[in-house]
Image (cartoon, rainbow, N blue to C red):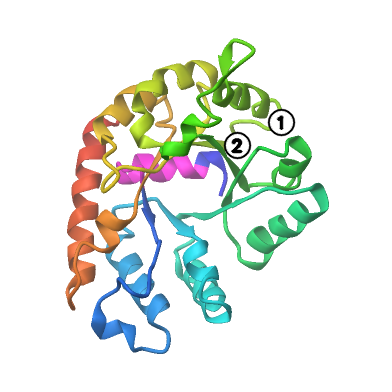
């Protein structure tokens, strides 16, 4: 999916919601847990219920990799089931020496048909370059995260600027707003205005709204650009909204609440 198509979806749906399919077998409704293909059946119901309110789905691959072969199969089935109109993110946080990253890129962009993958920039340009070489695919680089450990490196000063600022300035030279996004945690909303000075045109993937306490209003106020430029992810708040046979309906209700609020923040 290219940038034009992504922006078109945002404008048509009046939404920049990304639903996180961080599906934990122990947390899905009990009536599904005994099914042989429980993860996919759960994901399928969530997708059917929320596809009109969101423009993207993000799969945290760890929840699938932990299950071995069955998990990978469920992930592939899920990716294939997501409509082509929706932006598909592999939240895999990869990044390694060039020939290894090439294989990661092939796995997630060719074998599994994701539109985007999250990557860690610590090893530098050659670890990210293989992802950027794919046309109409997106590399989403960790910028400023919400976890406590962000203070250990990201928020440390180096050469007069925070390390995360150096990452943003450097990585933007490797790609363009057509193939590069950055992860910025919703609980870091106070830094979004500064981040927009550094990267005014790039899309931001913003996790942390919902259970993690991030404010959708603050993120929109400080992070939105002329094209919206935001994909705000909500995972547990939506997919675990209900734990009985009406779980998908309850997930839809929460997604509708997010979409309604997002519509108010988008320009007319």
**Where in the figure is residue 261, as x and y percent of width and height?**
20, 39
Residue 261 versus residue 47 in the image, above or below: above
State the residue in front, 66 or 250: 66
Q: Please give the label number shown on residue 180.
A: 2
Q: Which mark is residue 84?
A: none
Residue 227 lies left or right of residue 169; in this view the side is left
Name the side, left or right, on which 27 lies relative to 135.
Answer: left
The residue singled out by tag 1 in the image is 174
Q: Is residue 112 above or below residue 232?
A: below
Q: Dot 2: what SS? A: strand
Q: Secondary structure at mark 1?
A: loop
Residue range in magenta is 5-17
Q: Residues within 10 Å of mark 1 (few under 14, many from 20)?
A: some
> Residue at the top extreme?
160
Image quadrant in which the C terminus is located: top left
* Residue 267 appears in the picture as rendered: no
42 horizontally vs 165: left or right: left
Determine the image quadrant of residue 126. Answer: top right
Above or below residue 239? Residue 184 is: above
């Amino acid at each position: 999916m290219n940038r034009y198509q992504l922006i078109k979806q945002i404008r048509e749906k009046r939404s920049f919601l990304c639903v996180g399919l961080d599906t934990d077998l122990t947390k899905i409704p009990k009536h599904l847990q005994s099914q042989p293909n429980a993860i996919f059946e759960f994901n399928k119901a969530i997708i059917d219920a929320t596809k009109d309110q969101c423009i993207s789905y993000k799969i945290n691959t760890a929840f699938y990799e932990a299950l071995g072969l069955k998990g990978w199969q469920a992930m592939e089935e899920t990716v294939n089931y997501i409509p082509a109109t929706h932006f598909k993110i592999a939240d895999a946080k990869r990044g390694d020496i060039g020939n290894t990253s090439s294989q990661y890129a092939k796995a997630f962009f060719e074998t599994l048909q994701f539109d985007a993958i999250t990557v860690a920039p610590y090893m530098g340009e050659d670890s990210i370059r293989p992802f950027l070489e794919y046309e109409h695919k997106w590399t989403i680089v960790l910028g400023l995260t919400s976890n406590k450990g962000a203070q250990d490196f990201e928020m440390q000063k180096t050469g007069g600027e925070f390390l995360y600022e150096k990452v943003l300035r450097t990585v933007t030279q490797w790609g363009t707003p057509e193939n590069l996004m950055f992860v910025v945690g919703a609980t870091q909303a106070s830094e979004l205005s500064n981040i927009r000075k550094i990267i005014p045109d790039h899309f931001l993937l913003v996790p942390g709204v919902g259970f993690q306490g991030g404010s959708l209003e603050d993120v929109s106020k400080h992070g939105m650009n002329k094209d919206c430029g935001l994909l705000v992810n909500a995972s547990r708040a939506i997919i675990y909204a209900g734990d009985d046979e009406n779980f998908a309906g309850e997930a839809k209700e929460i997604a509708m609440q997010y979409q309604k609020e997002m519509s108010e923040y988008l320009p007319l």
